[in-house]
Amino acid sequence: MSYRILIVDDSKLARMAVAKVLGAVHPDWVRVEAANADEAVARARETTLDLAVLDFNMPGRDGLALVAELHALKPGMPLAVISANHQTEIVQRVGEAGATFLAKPLTEAALRSFLDSAVKRLEAAKT
């Protein structure tokens, strides 16, 4: 089954890197991109999204603030936050916000693990 995934990062290069890894794992999935939290919220309001991968550090609102906004708009939507900052406090805050932490640079194995878990959650929610 094909899903719609939101990729949010202020760096076009970073969005391309996530899209490349996603394309290797699930080439049939639809990618929706946003460069910041405002664009991400707009995309979430205007289109159906199944899951999202968000950058932690962005101008304006960071990935944790965006997690809260997306959970309010789309309760139960699986979310991952990616960051090069692997400090225990950051990883813990991401988990407490209800998202999965993924380290940058993003590996295919890490993204695949998140996506597999997300698909299981989405499928379970349908039953």
Image (tube, rainbow, N blue to C red):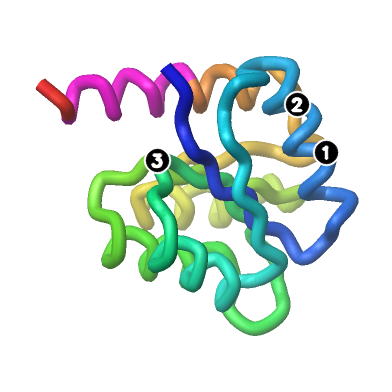
Q: CA distance from mark 1 to mark 2?
A: 6 Å
Coordinates of residue 83 in the picture (x, y in percent): 70, 50
Q: CA distance from mark 3 to mark 1?
A: 20 Å
Q: Is residue 2 magenta?
A: no
Residue flagged by tag 3: what amino acid is it? Asp
Residue flagged by tag 2: what amino acid is it? Val
* Residue farthest toward the bottom in the current orientation of the protein: 60
Disc nearer the start of the sequence (3/1): 1
Label 2 residue SS: helix
Disc nearer the start of the sequence (3/2): 2
| Residue 101, quarter of picture | top right
Q: Residues within 10 Å of mark 2 (few under 14, many from 20)?
A: some
* Residue farthest toward the left in the current orientation of the protein: 127
The disc at residue 21 is 2
Quickly name the residue at label 1. Answer: 17
Residue at 46% x, 57% y is 93
Coordinates of residue 108 in the picture (x, y in percent): 72, 19
Coordinates of residue 35 in the picture (x, y in percent): 71, 66
Quickly name the residue at label 3. Answer: 50
Q: Residues within 10 Å of mark 3 (few under 14, many from 20)?
A: many
Q: Residues within 10 Å of mark 1 (few under 14, many from 20)?
A: some
Which span is picked out in magenta?
116-125
Label 1 residue SS: helix
Tell me the quadrant of the picture where the N terminus can be found: top left
Residue flagged by tag 1: what amino acid is it? Ala
Is the residue 80 above or below the residue 123 in the image?
A: below
